[in-house]
Image (cartoon, rainbow, N blue to C red):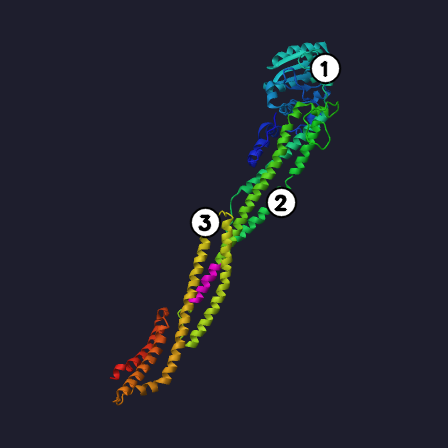
Amino acid sequence: MCRCRPSPEANLTSLVAKAGAGGRAGRLMDSPRALDVLPLLQERLAELPGARDRRGGPVLFFPATPRRERAKPEDYRRLLQYLLSIPCEEQRELGFAVVIDMRGSTWSTVKPILKVLQEHCNALIHVAYIIKPDNFWQKQRTSLASHKYKFETCLIGLDALPKSIDTSQLTLDLDGSLIYDHAHWIEMRLALEDFLWQAADLLDRLDDLQEDLSRGDLADDLAGAKAALDLHNEMKKKILKAPVEEVDLVGQRLLQRLSGEGGPSGYDSGYSGRDSEASSGTTNPDLQACVPDILQHLEAGRTAQQQLLSLWAHKKARLDQCFQLRLFEQDCDKMLDWICRNREVFLSNYVEIGHSYQLAQQLQEEHNHFTANSMNAFININRVLGAASRLLETGHYAANRIRHVAGRLERAWKEFAAGLDERNAVLSLSVMFHHKAEQLHAIYVESTPAWSQACEVGNAPSDISELEAAIHSHQSLYEAMCQAYTEVTTQFDFRHIRIVSERAFCEDVGGILLNYFRFMSPTRVY
């Protein structure tokens, strides 16, 4: 059986199917364990030392033992169900050669064995060799009963057995040279099956973790995203706590025992050839056939853990992105809420521009203070928008969502900032207007008596030069009054004043001056 390396790209499900559910390992997991029939194995009612007949088929031995008399058919059925499942499928298809040592026993103790073989596993039996008993009459009874079985039965003497099974494949009690220690065989089977069960359980646990990691649900809020990260970090602890190293160590020790070496090195597929208890493991083809399964489970465990860690890291990056997204959304919501609240405060006195220079100046100072505070919020908004750019640069899975939320925040701020700039311009014009209006009013109060006196019509001078001088003086007075009016009406843009009452106030002031200008028109001189 060749060793197959699982592909690095294979997922855990395929690893579990390959290492635990398919081939020889899967059949061992579905079959009875040595632990289930341990008392029967220790009775040594039957043995499977790894011998092969001349066809290459496995040989099953029923050694002569007094314990056979108290064995029940159910005991044989359970025992055979376990033993016949051990060889690989290719060997099982060749059929078993069964050797029943009838020496020192009676036909009544052999008949239950043949009956169980006939009723429960005759399709797996190629031939049954019954070693002749010492008693002559027992031989006769045996020969008369042998024709009842579907598989071939052969009553032979011990000396004729090597014709079908080489002596190197016969145990010492059958005059063969096969080294076999039944207690050691049981120990090896227990160790092997215990390892396979541990390895299969490990892969099942890793597969369960893989299913948990494969869930693609992401939290909808920041608290859920934080909880998911905490849970994911706990998942890594579970992955690292998986007994991969422990199972690997058990497997390596088992391989060393199967190779007949006790050193720290890995498995050596060569045979030591030493006549010791270990040699029964190194030369037993059934045990050696499990070596690829052991290697496969060892590699599957290591690969599965590495894949889990890789999958964990991939999901960790996605959960981090989810957490960053929810944090970004939360920050955006806070900024949008701030803009909304302050827009309401801003609009509550948006139409007020002041009825005097002092009030307009006070409103301007309050607005400047409000704008300065808003600039602090703008710093936070810029930070949030910068975070959005960084998230987009990393290839975030929710890039469209980030662009949408960031665009919404940016538009809201631009609208808010435009309102701040517009109101600042209006208040600046209001302050300028009231300042100029109050200056003009002061001039008007101070200059009205003089203007009125200057505009009184008296006797026109008869001298041309004096008349020209009077005209020039009156024209200068007119131009001074026009200049005062112009400073109010041209330096202040009334289109920026949104309140009709304020605009009317401004126009009324201008109207007063305009009446004076009409009154002072040079045409009245002539």
Residue 372 point in image, percent of width and height: 49, 66
Task: Say which residue label 2 marks.
Answer: 237
Q: Which residues are magenta?
A: 334-347
Question: Residue 410's quadrant in the figure?
Answer: bottom left
Under mark 2, the amino acid is Lys
Q: Is residue 347 above or below residue 162?
A: below
Which image quarter is the C terminus in? Answer: bottom left
Q: Is residue 12 visible?
A: yes
Dot 1 falls on a residue whose secondary structure is loop
Under mark 1, the amino acid is Arg
Q: Is residue 509 visible?
A: no
Residue 267 point in image, percent of width and height: 68, 29
Identify which residue is drawn at 42% across, 71% down.
428
Under mark 3, the amino acid is Asn
Identify which residue is drawn at 46% across, 63% down.
341
Q: Earlier in the sequence, mark 2 or mark 1?
A: 1
Task: Say which residue label 3 marks.
Answer: 400
Evaluate if marks 2 and 3 touch, with contact meaning CB atoms under 8 Å apart. no
Residue 103's disc is 1
Which image quarter is the N terminus in? Answer: top right
Q: Earlier in the sequence, mark 3 or mark 1?
A: 1
State the CA–CA distance, disc 2 to disc 3. 34 Å
State the CA–CA distance, disc 3 to disc 1. 86 Å
Question: Residue 104's quadrant in the figure?
Answer: top right
Pointer 3 local density, CA inside 10 Å: few below 14, some 14–19, many at least 20: few
Residue 331 point in image, percent of width and height: 50, 57
Evaluate if marks 2 and 1 touch, with contact meaning CB atoms under 8 Å apart. no
